[in-house]
Amino acid sequence: MALPVDISVLLQSDVIEDSLYKDEGVCILGIFGKSAVQAGCAKESLINILSDKHVFSLFGTDETDGLDERSSIKAYYNQENRVLYLVLTTIFDNRQLLRACESLTSGLGHTEAHEFWKGADKDHCLKLLYLFSLCHILLLVHPTCSFDVTYDRLFRALDALRQKTLPFLRGAIKDCPVSKEWKMNCRPCPPRLLFVFQMNGALRISASGLAGNGNDGTGVDKPKKHSPRRRLQHALEDQIYRIFRKSRVLTNQSSNCLFTVPANQAFVYVVPGPEEDPIGSLLGQLRANCVLRECDPGTPAPGQRRYQQMRHSNRHPSFNIENSGLSLSGGQLVDCTLKEFLWQHVELVLNKKGFDDSVGRNPQPSHFELPTYSKWTRVASRLYQVMIENSEEDTAELFLKVQGQLKVLEGFLDADAKFSENRCQKALPLAHSTYQSNLPHNYTTTVHKNQLAQALRVYSQHARGVAFQRYAVQLHEDCYKFWSNGHQLCEERSLTDQHCVHKFHLLPKPGEKPEVDHNPPILYHNSRGRSTSSCNCGKKQAPREDPFDIQTANYDFYLMLEEKCCSKLERINFPVFQASTSDPAPACDDAARPQEAPASDAERLKEKESVTHTPGDSTGLSLALSLGQSTDSLGAYADGAEGHEKRQSVDRQASTVEYLPGMLHSGCPKGLLPKFSSWSLVKLGPAKSYNTLVGLEQPGFLPGSAFLLPWDLVIRSRSEDDSSSTELDGGASSWPAPNKVPAGKRSTVGIGRGRRRDDVSRVYVGFEYEDSRGRRFLSSGPDKVVKVLGQGGPKEPATRVLNSDMPLYIPSPAQGRGIKPHYAQLARLFVVVPDGPIEIMLSPQVQPGPPPCPIFHPEQPEVVLPPDGLWVLRFPYAYLTDSGPCYPPKENQPLASFRVLKGILRANTACSPAQ
């Protein structure tokens, strides 16, 4: 073989052997180790010296070889010397290390990079074990003259890996034509390991050093028997042997070891480095020549012969053949060459003597076999398929089993990961303790996430290394497991924004009873919040649980009280869903959503307020009604209002198949009704049942706050309305004569001046607020509570409350001791309609939150209140949209965003003239 090839190519090709050497054995010599940062490779250049041929390039091999491999094995077969050289090149060599670094991308994370290098280490160990299973002699090359103690850990890892994979390797070579001992031990013999170190300038050998530094007291230094390089080799041998014996890599029985070292032969060689100072080298040689001339007692050699000796010494200062055993300096042994150092071990193999490296009292001989080239290639090919690269189906299973045993290397080689594992394992209990500190027995997702963030912060302060992310994921899983194992609080919030106090549970199905012992328990939601509320009419109060669904909040509670109080009262029922099938379904919002226009609805409501609402601006309908004018007297304004109302009343018929799952509001699709109404409109009695001197005689009202506000309306006939309309038509006759008051302005005079009192009708209005403790009061304005100290009722008219947006929530007059403000919610609207020619139209509209919160209204947007009655409109207790409930205001939210729109009442005071 003229050139080195890859081991896979060697095993697949048929090498034509010389007939003289075909039946002779072959010594397998493996070379591995590390290389320094230099152009050539020291391991490959050694083969050039051993074979006396230019086999490998001095500047390295072809850069295209093994670009995609982390390591490779090059083979060179020297048939004349019967030696097969195997050179292992890994990431510990400069060329492979540069290629590996170039293959890493810039965005690769720390963990991914660590996995890459760990994979490279495993690949290196597996190919190194392949060499230990095939070679007789192994040569470890190191670029410095000091021993690298990390080899001790590497060899212990290889020994552990060999013991794990030995059964699979036996199965791979069981049919090979080799001896039984080879098949049993999976190697031709316990390989002998030799060490070659490079002299890298750390040790300087001077002329004085060659002569020694001893002193016999006469001032003349005694020459040393061994040169400094030889003494360094001996020191390294002692150091290496002690280290390997201490770590149990070497034992008395060589057959049980991964490798052996000779007991009575040199196994360390130090290659001398080049002379850095040529002038100093010449002066040293000249000085040595002078010393030789003075000290040599014999006859000097002839000039030509002596010149040739000195020239040879200058060219090869450290590779002198040890032919006489003594140097020219007087008794000092001459250092042997590298080839002489190595060949004494190779000859033991080629002579079939083997290695007897066992020590102790009863040394056991180890097996030895010198195979022919053909037998060795068959064994090497089978092991290559099992250990390096599998391409045959019959060895695929063994290959996977061997790869599965590589995890044994992690404990020996991955020191960074082991350190990281220890750090993260110590930080994990600290993080768990931080997570569980100050925790209630049951808690919500928000508390869980906050505690987990605290635990991760503590964990990140102590954990380090590549295992950080894996143990962080484990911390996530452990904390979630602790939370979900009986500590998870029900995530459901009530309609008043309070959490359910039960741990995670299921809701009972219809007809099913609660079961506390069930896992998970079957319970109804409960926030342990209780409040006091009144019935539809307000005559009876009862405690109520904090509701979690809209039907319980706005219908079931009042239905329960209705049976005890107001079931016999006259009422106006709002339309609800009437099913025409046995299995009605809730409406799908996606089909009807394109028909919605929340923005246009809001604009329509604003337009309706400015045109048709009662007590509005001073130029609107409220002024006309307060002056006793009817809607007919507004001419074009009234026509526009009526036309607008007519357009709004054109809606499609309510569905009898699909129902509205929530509450009715401005964003709901048209033609859908809920199964129940969240509003209630009942009649407490006739108009005279309200006593203006006493007020409302119902429980829970604060003293002096149960009085309704008066709203005076002027009743006019049709003829007067017509005449007034002609005066307000905007023509030339509409301008009054000098010193005369226009007809439309006469009502500005106080009631009773120039007008009969019989033409005035008085309506009583009251906005009732109720807090969670059942304390009730009426409001005379957005920020004022009705307060009557004496007899006669309140003095404020109802104009202010009807002309303004009334707040849905206001601070309760009776605040508790806590810092948190206590709010009262608008619960009812009382309206006393007198018996007379007057129509009171009720159209409540509530916006229970800041925009874009929709506007809620009853299922019948406008209701005409019959005359002679004390009517009570009960507002919903809670409001629910498609996106969830509208919670009560928080401390930082303005109360003005939660409002009841103005125009809740409109009056029609037109009456026909007497015939």
Image (cartoon, grey):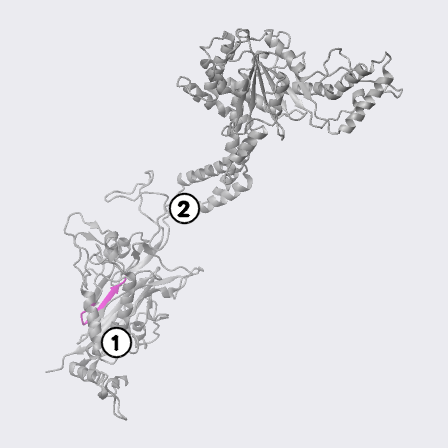
The x and y percentages for residue 87 are 56, 21
Per the image, the residue denoted by label 2 is 445
Tag 1: Cα neighbours inside 10 Å, few (<14), some, or many (≥20)?
A: many
The x and y percentages for residue 711 are 26, 76
Would residue 355 be seen by someone viewing this image from the given angle? no
Please state which of the two labelled residues, at mark 1 or mark 2, is closer to the viewer.
1
Q: Is residue 560 above or below residue 837?
A: above
The question of residue 842 being in magenta is answered with no
Per the image, the residue denoted by label 1 is 621
Q: Is residue 831 left or right of residue 418?
A: left
Q: Is residue 455 above or below residue 286?
A: below
Q: Residue type at mark 1: give it.
A: Leu
Give the distance between the C-alpha atoms of the residues marked 1 and 2, in whole angstroms: 53 Å
The x and y percentages for residue 803 are 30, 73
> Relative to the observer, which residue lies in front, 447 or 26?
26
The quarter of the picture where the N terminus appears is top right
Q: Residue type at mark 2: give it.
A: Thr
Would residue 886 be seen by someone viewing this image from the given angle? yes
Q: Residue 222: which quarter of the image?
A: top right
Tag 2: Cα neighbours inside 10 Å, few (<14), some, or many (≥20)?
A: some
Q: Secondary structure at mark 1?
A: helix
